[in-house]
Image: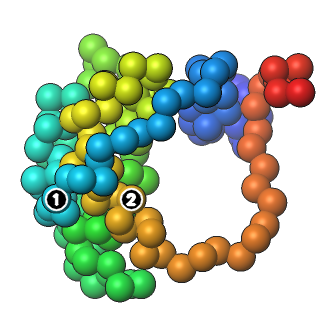
Amino acid sequence: MGDASFDFINPRYLLGISDEPKQLLQPITGYAYEPLLSLEEACEPLLDIVPRLEPHIWIAKENSKTPADGLSQDESASIRLYTMEWDAPANQTRGSLYSHLNRTLKQVDRTKLRPWFRYLKLFVTALAKLPVAPRQTVWRGVRKDHSAEYP
């Protein structure tokens, strides 16, 4: 039996840096021209990309009925949906929306982001409405010394 403090750590929290692109990527363009839609409409192109997305859209909306910070229910739910985690189906390695989006954001081929544009419009609009957080240091744990990769 392992150390109790590490028995339930999600390995994605510690290992995500290894698949970071080693080059600057082209900026993401085009999503800002999308109309601001409901969460259901914004996620429609993602239903074939993200497994089990529909029930999580419903849960995010149900838990966002009284949003703060001037957000609409759909804007608040878009943030909530991004932070939700669920298991992948047995035949896939990724389940949650954030794992699919983050992987796509790291790809050199920016056309792969096109199905995400509606969601990105809603999500970024919501994030822009949030109050500015106080300046602070955030640390991230990794299992390997990456200092040589970031001189």
Could you say where residue 123 lies in the image, as x and y percent from the top left? 34, 58
In the image, taking residue 10 as reference, residue 103 lies left or right, namely left
Is residue 91 depicted above or below 123 in this figure? above
Image quarter for residue 150? top right
Which secondary structure lies at badge 1? loop
Whether residue 15 is visible:
no
Closest to the observer, 37 or 48: 37
Q: Which mark is residue 124?
A: 2
In the image, taking residue 130 as reference, residue 23 lies left or right, namely right
Kind of residue at disc 1: Pro
Sequence-wise, the earlier of marks 2 and 1 is 1
Q: Residue at x 88, y 20 (%)?
A: 148
Kind of residue at disc 2: Val
Q: Residue at x 28, y 84 (%)?
A: 66
Q: Which mark is residue 35?
A: 1
Q: Residue at x 47, y 37 (%)?
A: 27
In the image, taking residue 84 as reference, residue 108 lies left or right, namely right
Which secondary structure lies at badge 2? helix
Could you say where residue 119 lies in the image, as x and y percent from the top left? 26, 50
